[in-house]
DNA sequence: CCGGGCGCCTGTCAGC
DNA sequence: TGCTGACAGGCGCCCG
């Protein structure tokens, strides 16, 4: 499912239900997702008070009044739903199978927060104070943060022969992009996804940098993109899928006025890239 | 270091 | 109505 905008949407939806609340019950239904969950997960979480929620790239970090923060990654199909309480969700997809509910947190307000992940590519872990967590250690800058600049992007592309599409998916270069928003940013920038990164001119990189930030910010405002799995914590869909200009639109008309191109799809390292052959070079 | 490919899992959909 | 293959918002690992 989730790229940065979807994860940020989930984080914002969870925040009012968790921050300042104590976890009174923790129900762990299986020992692992992509990796084993820590053996002391239930012990550490039970009775802990949540001090706040942060996001780093596609990870949610739940700060606790304990010597650990909870780390959550939603993989491809992970969903969070919040139920119960005054602000609880009310229109969750009835087809969500309880079979894939892997972790249920209950707060002192009677709210339940459930992690559902059919494909189990997601992760739950604990981050100890001062720990350089291996999943976070090598992440590049936050694309919406101050550390991400056109110069940083240019330096990361310099001399690289890999397609710009692959480089933007590399979380060490910039952290939080996935297939959707890379395709959309490259379209907006008029850059062909197969161009070698090192072949981009500075005059192309700065606009690309701006389009990456724009498309992410717009998607966050829309609550993310709901294709198959993503829902806001309330159960409500995101709406940015209606704004896609190329993603998933093979055979459709290029939205650029007067272009007349037809959206194409190519495979790049096993994943689909959609683009307009007419206006992306 | 670099680039590319594989595999982890389940669900859905198109085509036969 | 099956069945089969392709494909899906990610990412660590292994290979040359």
Image: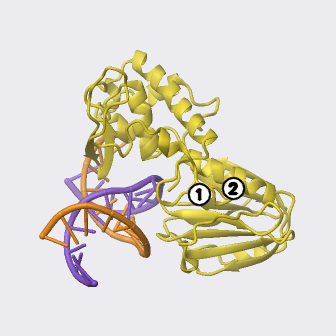
Chain colours: A yellow, B orange, C purple
The residue where tag 2 is placed is A61
Q: Secondary structure at mark 1?
A: loop
Quadrant where the C terminus of chain A sits is: top left
| The quarter of the displayed image where residue A110 is located | bottom right
The residue where tag 1 is placed is A231
| The quarter of the displayed image where residue A249 is located | top left
Residue A52 — which label? none
Depth-wise, is mark 2 or mark 1 nearer the camera?
1
Query: What is the x, y in percent for residue A200?
Result: 35, 23
Residues indicated by labels 2 and 1 sit on the same polypeptide chain: yes
Query: What is the x, y in percent for residue A210?
Result: 52, 25
Residue A131 in view, yes or no:
no
The residue depicted at 71 percent of the width and 63 percent of the height is A89
Measured in 3D between alpha carbons, the distance from the residue under mark 2 to the one under mark 1, in whole angstroms, is 19 Å
A197 w.r.t. C8: above or below: above
Mark 1 chain:
A
Mark 2 chain:
A
The front one of A131 and A217 is A217
Question: Of label 2 and label 1, which has the lower sequence position?
Answer: 2
Query: Residues at badges 2 and 1 in contact (C-beta under 8 Å)?
Result: no
The residue depicted at 46 percent of the width and 69 percent of the height is A119
The residue depicted at 31 percent of the width and 48 percent of the height is A272
The front one of A186 and A228 is A228
Query: What is the x, y in percent for residue A74?
Result: 56, 60
The residue depicted at 47 percent of the width and 21 percent of the height is A207
| The quarter of the displayed image where residue A28 is located | bottom right
Crowding around mark 2 (Cα neighbors within 10 Å: few <14, some 14 to 19, many 20+) is many
Residue A274 in view, yes or no:
yes
């Amino acid at each position: 499912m989730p790229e940065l905008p979807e994860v940020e949407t989930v984080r914002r939806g969870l925040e009012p239900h968790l921050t300042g609340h104590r976890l009174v019950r923790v129900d762990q239904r299986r020992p692992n997702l992509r990796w084993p969950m820590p053996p002391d997960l239930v012990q550490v979480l039970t009775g802990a008070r949540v001090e706040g929620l942060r996001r780093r790239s596609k990870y949610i970090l739940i700060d606790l009044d304990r010597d650990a923060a909870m780390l959550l990654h939603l993989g491809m199909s992970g969903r969070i739903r919040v139920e119960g309480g005054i602000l609880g969700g009310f229109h969750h997809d009835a087809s969500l199978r309880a079979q894939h509910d892997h972790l249920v947190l209950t707060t002192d307000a009677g709210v339940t927060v459930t992690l559902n992940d059919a494909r189990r590519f997601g992760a739950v872990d604990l981050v100890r104070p001062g720990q350089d967590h291996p999943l976070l250690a090598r992440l590049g800058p936050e694309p919406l943060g101050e550390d991400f600049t056109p110069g940083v992007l240019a330096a990361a592309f310099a001399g690289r022969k890999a397609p710009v599409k692959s480089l933007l998916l590399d979380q060490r270069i910039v952290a939080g992009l996935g297939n959707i928003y890379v395709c959309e940013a490259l379209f907006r920038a008029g850059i062909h996804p197969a161009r070698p990164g090192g072949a981009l001119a500075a005059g192309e990189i700065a606009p690309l940098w701006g389009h990456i930030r724009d498309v992410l910010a717009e998607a966050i405002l829309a609550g993310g993109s709901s294709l198959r799995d993503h829902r806001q914590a309330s159960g409500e869909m995101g709406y940015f899928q209606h704004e896609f200009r190329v993603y998933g639109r093979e055979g459709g008309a290029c939205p650029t006025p007067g272009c007349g191109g037809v959206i194409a799809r190519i495979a790049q390292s096993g994943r689909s890239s959609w683009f307009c052959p007419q206006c992306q070079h």
